[in-house]
Image: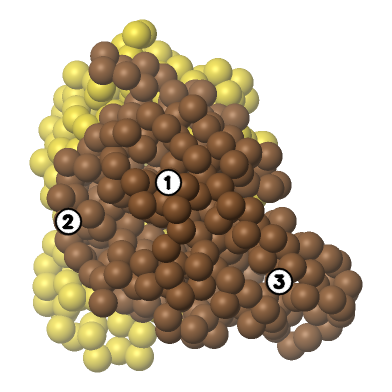
Chain colours: A yellow, B brown
């Protein structure tokens, strides 16, 4: 099954466009979790158990595992193994390097860790993206327009034919006729989401920045959904993971996730 | 000691501007190495032992360790521990993410692995770079103009005030008055190296693409050296690592590395 097929099935089964970002920060874990053998793994497992019927994908953030040092790899691997096989995993590592190196990142994230999709930085151009694109059963999300302040520095700078991020969107369409190439578009930029959707009517958009980063959910979904009221993944991380700091953290995470899921669905012009 | 100080000392001690990229590809290791307990670690140790008096830095490429799976982290850690303390380590991972995530990459690569410097992708702008810049004792190298074909897709595209890569160079200068921010500039673009050097007279340039990628060494050094005949690190990876495929691989690597070191020095207008 390809990534788009797996994603569409999860969207339909859970009636959800919510993606939960697994950014487990040791410093923010509930006190009761910190005494466990592997606090980060236990926390992730509890969050996954509490939300797996509410999401269309999980997005583990590699940096939050890497910063654990030697424990990072086994913790990430065990976290991924705990995610039900029906829910696609988008590994967020924002990789980008020349072809021979990118091939090693593909082995690392797609083969060794078995992720279904990967976030990729477009700066170095087509040959840095190709080793991921050529794995047609996998998905990639190219960074296009991000939700941070620094997006002004380069992403929004104007080229002869429009801002840089729009060129990235056009290249995503050009490089991947098969459609396994989506885009990362921050929720804090609703007017831009509309422009990008016009450029790539049929590509999935991964939209972080709702919640902790202050994006407007309603505008993001209204601007970013495709013609069928789908094609957009709304990512929430901190707002779900740290919904409560006590022993009820998993139940609280479930409640926030379900609210978000329903809020997103209420903004769709039609749901699956 | 800050990264620039450590680098300058290594440059002077070894009279070298050569940086060896540690991109240990399992498929390319000499047959005799493959039967070792940890072939990649053994290979790296032999290369380091054979070249540590000829280089100004080592640049391990994270992808080539990550693709080893669970063995990746301990192999990378042990490789770094084998590098003499006097030789700076530039970890090549081309990271770039929002501030809170970048902070975790800083912990991973600079604290847990103890690298002296890190390569960083500028696409997401200043706040994605700041968590590294603020560690004043460490160095970063921002991707500016790379040596691959895909550099045409975005890096060389024209903004109102010149190509994107030149804006990256100006931002590197603006963001880091302390000078711990250098640039990655491919050796295959000699005319551009000159432009970049004019924009950042006092920043170190990390120049890959000599050898396997076909860059012209003489032009690169002539265009990229600073006013003192330094400030440029010429990186070679495959040309050194795989100089021979037999039991003499380390001696062959040493020979190629020393030739390169001398060729580079012959191109400098003055040497330290």
Q: Earlier in the sequence, mark 2 or mark 1?
A: 2
Viewer-closest of A232 and B98: B98
Residue B160: percent from left, percent from top: 26, 14
C-alpha separation, residue under disc 2 versus residue under disc 1: 20 Å
Residue B225 image label: 1
Callout 3: chain: B
Specify whether disc 3 shares its chain with disc 1. yes
Say which quarter of the image contains residue A72. bottom left
Q: Secondary structure at mark 1?
A: loop
Q: Earlier in the sequence, mark 3 or mark 2?
A: 2
Viewer-closest of B158 and A154: B158
Q: Secondary structure at mark 2?
A: loop
Give the number of the mark in front: 3 or 1: 1
Residue A25: percent from left, percent from top: 24, 69
Viewport quadrant of the C terminus of chain A: top left
Q: Earlier in the sequence, mark 3 or mark 1?
A: 1
- B48 in relation to B202, above or below: below
Callout 2: chain: B
- B156 in relation to B18, above or below: above
**Can residue A261 be seen?**
no
- A126 in relation to A197, above or below: below
Label 3 sits on residue: B254
Residue B74: percent from left, percent from top: 54, 82
Specify whether disc 3 shares its chain with disc 2. yes
Label 2 sits on residue: B178
Say which quarter of the image contains residue B50. bottom right
């Amino acid at each position: 099954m390809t990534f788009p097929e797996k994603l569409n099935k999860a969207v339909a089964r859970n009636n959800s466009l919510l993606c939960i970002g697994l950014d487990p920060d040791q410093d923010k874990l509930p006190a009761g979790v910190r005494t466990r053998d592997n606090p980060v793994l236990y926390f992730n497992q509890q969050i996954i158990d509490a939300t797996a019927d509410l999401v269309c994908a999980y997005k583990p953030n590699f940096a939050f595992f890497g910063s654990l040092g030697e424990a990072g790899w086994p913790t990430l691997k065990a976290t991924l193994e705990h995610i039900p096989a029906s829910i696609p995993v988008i590994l967020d590592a924002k990789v980008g390097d020349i072809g021979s190196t990118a091939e090693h990142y593909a082995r690392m994230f797609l083969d060794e860790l078995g992720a279904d999709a990967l976030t990729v930085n477009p700066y170095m151009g087509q040959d840095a993206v190709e080793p991921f694109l050529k794995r047609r059963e996998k998905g990639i999300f190219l960074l296009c327009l991000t939700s941070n302040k620094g997006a002004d520095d380069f992403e929004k700078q104007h080229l002869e034919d429009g801002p840089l991020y729009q060129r990235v969107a056009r290249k995503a369409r050009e490089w991947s006729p098969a459609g396994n190439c989506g885009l990362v578009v921050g929720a804090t930029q609703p007017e831009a989401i509309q422009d990008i959707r016009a450029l790539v009517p049929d590509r999935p958009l991964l939209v972080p920045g709702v919640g902790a980063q202050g994006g407007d959910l309603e505008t993001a979904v209204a601007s970013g959904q495709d013609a069928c009221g789908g094609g957009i993944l709304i990512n929430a991380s901190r707002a779900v993971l740290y919904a409560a700091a006590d022993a009820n953290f998993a139940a609280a995470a479930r409640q926030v996730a379900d609210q978000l899921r329903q809020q997103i669905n209420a903004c769709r012009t039609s749901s699956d």
